[in-house]
Image (cartoon, rainbow, N blue to C red):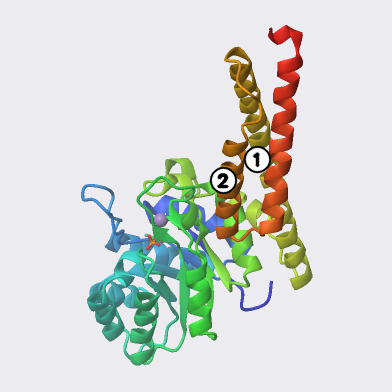
Amino acid sequence: MNSKWQLIAGPCSAETREQVMETAKGLVSLQPSYFRAGIWKPRTRPGEFEGSGNPALEWMKEAKATYGLKICTEVATSQHVELALNAGFDMLWIGARTTTNPFSVQEIADALRGVDLPIMVKNPINPDLKLWVGAIERLYNVGVVDVSAIHRGFSVYEIAKYRNNPNWQIPIDLKQELPQLPLLCDPSHITGDASMLLEVAQKAIDLKYDGLMLETHCNPREAWTDAKQQVSPAELAELLAKLHFRDRREIEEAELLEFRAKINAMDEAIIHLLTERMFTSGLIGKFKKEHNLAILQKARWEELLVSNVDKAVKLNLSQEFSMQLFKLIHQESIHIQSQILNDKNHE
Ligand code: PEP
Ligand code: MN
């Protein structure tokens, strides 16, 4: 890890004084750049735990004083900014739901005018690069110089592998537009599942991100929010130990292996499909035998060949290759049907 690589760890929400202190204690040896906890939680629907509010400011202050950790939290209003600044927070971030709203971002930016503090901006929940860039610009415009971005994925409606789709192209495009901007990844909110954190964290490292935000809780299964995606400090240590800070060459080799694995899977699918294709040819053979039909029905074959080659060429396969491939498939099909015709067992 280089010196500016950052680790942000801590619970999704500050729940109780004991939970904050216990988690902070567990994290000290990992020396995170910041200890995080949500104090005001933006909940999609009302009636869920909305954060502990002001008392939690005191617990975070205590964690900072006791363990010497820098502390950070999410702010969504100018009032949050004021309270967090008064409590001595070392970094503030704008959450994904807030980044979608330029009015809220501007309100926060105005409250930060003249404040010398690192501010991080999570991507908006919708896959809109301009909104993300816009929020960052609003901070630059009020004189905040230390701005970073956090990639936490984008909302999905359908059932998908991850809770939020990473859409890697968007943070890559963000880096293209703002090359100096540090970019962190939040695998906790991308995956929504502790068992998948490693693969996303590794991918972020391979893409040369500048750090990770990982939700960590002293008792993750009992967490009041985001229980499925949180890990204990010990699990976090294990995960970090598994991360591999690879050089260019190793990344290329890993990518090559990934391509090869894809090719292997596709070859296997082709074999299965061909097996099914030939099995069906056999069924046709039996049918022809029972109904006394000729095996080779030349007109049908020619029509099929032309139409298949045509489709293949439209999808960018070469004429020569498609022609050979379908002739070969047809030959084998005829061969199978002839065997059936001559086989006494099929009488
Ligand atoms: C969080 O970090 O706990 C959080 C609410 O994140 P996001 O804004 O990415 O949903
Ligand atoms: Mn969370």
Expressed as whole percent of the image width and height from the top left, the position of residue 252 reads 74, 67
Which residue lies at the image location 21% right of the left edge and 50% below the top edge?
46
**Viewed as shown, does residue 16 lie left or right of 172?**
left
Q: Could you say which is closer to the camera, residue 269 or residue 209?
A: 269
> Which image quarter: residue 84?
bottom left
Q: Is mark 1 within 8 Å of ligand 1?
A: no
Expressed as whole percent of the image width and height from the top left, the position of residue 285 reads 64, 21
Circles 1 and 2, Cβ within 8 Å, touching? The answer is no
**Viewed as shown, does residue 116 lie left or right of 106?**
right
Q: Look at the picture and state if 82 lies above or below 16.
A: below
Q: Could you say which is closer to the camera, residue 240 or residue 275?
A: 275
Please identify, in this view, whether the residue under mark 1 or under mark 2 is nearer the observer: 1
Q: Could you say which is closer to the camera, residue 219 or residue 119?
A: 119
Res. 195 mark: 2
| Dot 1 alpha-carbon crowd within 10 angstroms: few under 14, some 14 to 19, many 20 or more | few
Expressed as whole percent of the image width and height from the top left, the position of residue 344 reads 75, 8
Helix, strand or loop for disc 2: helix
Expressed as whole percent of the image width and height from the top left, the position of residue 146 reads 47, 85
Mark pair 1, 2: CA separation: 28 Å
Which residue lies at the image location 74% right of the left edge and 72% below the top edge?
248
Q: Look at the picture and state if 199 lies above or below 300.
A: below
> Which image quarter: residue 304?
top right
**Viewed as shown, does residue 45 lie left or right of 8?**
left
Which residue lies at the image location 61% right of the left edge and 50% below the top edge?
234
- The kind of residue tagged 2 is Ser
Disc with the residue nearer the chain's start (1 vs 2): 2
Helix, strand or loop for disc 1: helix
Q: Which residue corresponds to mark 1?
A: 269
Q: Could you say which is closer to the camera, residue 275 or residue 220?
A: 275
